[in-house]
């Protein structure tokens, strides 16, 4: 299911030269196309994730820093695109809004933010306490910030914690969810995830 978001993201950013991947994690969706861009940098607070990403050669460079201190490490307008995937829901609303503001200052052309549609509970896993979901983000609040919103991964009723298919057999229900994703791209109200895009 991640490929749906990755391909949608690729269409938005691959024509640009530079990209900052905020909260990149170990397996950023840009791994499917980062080799088509000139310069991509990954940022994450969890060093083991950076090491896994570095081993996979997803980015050209890495910064092991707190994302809420981005403005201390990157100049305004220093990247064409700044993205975050599955990140802002791990922050409080205040911190999430602070991060969005910093991302918009560092980007010169586009910001893309992917997050679950509303609040989806998630606990710690893989030894990473930062994986807990703290906040939920709604379509209308992102639109008020000037973002256009695309639905990702079909109807949210199919998904449970960690974005896993809720029912068994998972292969069957995963295919059904896949069949719904194209409708929910343009009708994101009940989509599982939302990709929020702002052209600067």
Image (cartoon, rainbow, N blue to C red):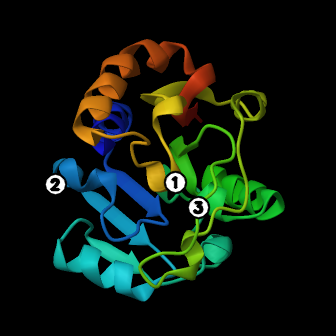
Mark number, residue 161: 1
| Residue at (39% x, 42% y) in the render | 165
Label 3 to label 1: alpha-carbon separation = 6 Å
Q: Residue 22 placed where, x, y %? A: 49, 63
> Going by the image, does 61 lie left or right of 89?
left
Q: Residue 170 placed where, x, y %? A: 29, 41
Q: Residue 12 placed where, x, y %? A: 38, 33
Label 2's element? Answer: helix
Mark number, residue 122: 3
> Going by the image, does 121 lie left or right of 171?
right
Q: Quadrant of the N terminus?
A: top left
Is residue 80 at least partly visible in the picture? no
Q: Do labels 2 and 1 touch, CB within 8 Å?
A: no
**Where, by quadrant of the figure, is residue 88 drawn?**
bottom right
Label 3's element? Answer: loop
- The residue furthest front is 168
């Amino acid at each position: 299911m991640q490929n749906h978001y990755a391909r949608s993201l690729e269409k938005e950013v691959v024509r640009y030269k530079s990209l900052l991947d905020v909260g990149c994690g170990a397996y950023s969706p840009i791994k499917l196309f980062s080799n088509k861009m000139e310069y991509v940098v990954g940022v994450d607070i969890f060093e083991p994730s950076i090491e896994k990403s570095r081993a996979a050669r997803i980015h050209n460079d890495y910064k092991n820093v707190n994302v809420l201190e981005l403005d201390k490490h990157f100049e305004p307008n220093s990247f064409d695109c700044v993205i975050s995937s599955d990140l802002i829901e791990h922050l409080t609303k205040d911190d999430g809004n602070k991060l969005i503001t910093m991302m918009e200052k560092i980007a010169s052309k586009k910001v893309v933010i992917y997050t679950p549609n509303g609040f989806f509970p998630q606990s710690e896993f893989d030894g990473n306490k930062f994986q807990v979901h703290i906040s939920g983000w709604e379509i209308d609040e992102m639109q008020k910030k000037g973002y256009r919103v695309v639905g990702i991964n079909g109807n949210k009723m199919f998904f449970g914690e960690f974005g896993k298919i809720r029912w068994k057999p998972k292969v069957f229900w995963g295919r059904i969810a896949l069949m719904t994703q194209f409708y929910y791209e343009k009708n994101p109200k009940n989509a599982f995830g939302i990709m929020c895009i702002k052209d600067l």
